Image: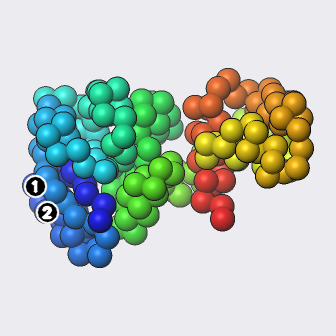
């Protein structure tokens, strides 16, 4: 059972989401909060698996709450639930440690998918955002060298948490070769660290691959 803390300041919206989640056989809303500080207190006391977090709550906004949750309770998966589809919001929340980002205007199945993915340790990005990001990236990187299929697979496995040794074993290549593929791909895509790799993988749908 996935235990969920629901943080949303609009009572009507909160009630609707609670009914949706509690109707699922594998989810239970264990607490609710209407503002940021109360969210932190409830999370500290109850240690839910997932916090569904609105970004525009009174007292403390969702970004600040997400940063504190990630720093103090890193085992809890945070999912941002918002109407904001601006890439700046997305990137800042994911960099702050959020494991998922879902738009309120998307179908309710997206929130359910995000909760299940986040509880399993997999980042999740609303497909509507991912599609928009991909289109922007294509335009922005029209002249960027393409990575090879092997480089892509190395990055994908890196994004889901595999070590260089595990990647090498799975692909039947040496650890040194893994490091070369990783370095070449990150250079081509201008990715500077694992956070960039995870974000890029999420934006391109690699994390939902079988």
Q: Is residue 198 left or right of residue 122?
A: right
SS type, badge 2: helix
Instruction: Say if mark 2 contacts mark 1, CB within 8 Å.
Output: yes
* Quarter of the figure that contains the N terminus: bottom left
Coordinates of residue 12 in the picture (x, y in percent): 12, 60
Cα separation between marks 2 and 1: 6 Å
With 177 as the anchor, is 73 left or right in this view? left
Residue 147 in which image quadrant: top right
Q: What is the crowding at mark 2: few (fewer than 14 residues within 10 Å), some, or many (at least 20)? A: some
Residue at 76 percent across and 45 percent down: it is 167
Residue 116 visible in rendering: yes
Q: Callout 1: helix, strand or loop?
A: helix
Above or below for 49 versus 60: below
Disc 1 residue crowd, few under 14, some 14–19, many 20+, Cα 10 Å = few
Residue 134 seen: no
Question: What is the number of the mark on residue 208?
Answer: none
Q: Reply above or below: 186 against 133.
A: above
Q: Position of residue 47 (x, y in %)?
A: 23, 44
Q: Quadrant of residue 116?
A: bottom left
Report the front residue among 12 and 187. Answer: 187
Q: Is residue 137 above or below residue 204?
A: above
Residue 193 point in image, percent of width and height: 64, 26
Measuring 42% from the left and 30% from the top, which residue is drawn there?
A: 96
**Which of the labelled discs sits on residue 15, or is there none?**
2
The spot of residue 150 in percent (x, y) is 86, 47
Quadrant of the rendering where the C terminus is positioned: bottom right
Q: Which residue is mark 1?
A: 11
Question: Residue at 22% of width from left, 64% of height from top?
Answer: 28
Residue drawn where x is 83% and y is 35% of the image: 175
């Amino acid at each position: 059972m996935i235990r969920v803390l629901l943080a949303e300041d609009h009572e009507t919206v909160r009630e609707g989401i609670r009914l949706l989640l509690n109707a699922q056989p594998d989810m239970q809303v264990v607490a609710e909060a209407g503002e940021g500080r109360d969210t932190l207190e409830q999370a500290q006391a109850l240690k839910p698996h997932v916090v569904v977090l609105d970004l525009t709550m009174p007292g403390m906004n969702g970004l600040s709450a997400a940063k504190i949750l990630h720093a103090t309770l890193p085992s809890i998966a945070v999912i941002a639930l918002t109407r904001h589809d601006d890439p700046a919001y997305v990137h800042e929340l994911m960099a702050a440690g959020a494991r998922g980002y879902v738009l309120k205007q998307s179908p309710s199945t997206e929130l359910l998918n995000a909760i299940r993915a986040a509880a399993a340790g997999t980042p999740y990005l609303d497909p509507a955002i991912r599609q928009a990001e991909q289109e922007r990236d294509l335009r922005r990187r029209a002249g960027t060298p393409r990575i090879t299929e092997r480089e892509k697979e190395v990055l994908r496995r890196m994004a889901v948490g595999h070590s260089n040794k595990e990647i090498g074993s799975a692909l039947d290549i040496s650890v040194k070769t893994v490091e070369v593929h990783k370095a070449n791909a990150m250079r081509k895509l201008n990715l500077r660290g694992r956070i960039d790799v995870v974000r890029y993988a999420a934006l391109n749908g690699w994390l939902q691959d079988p």
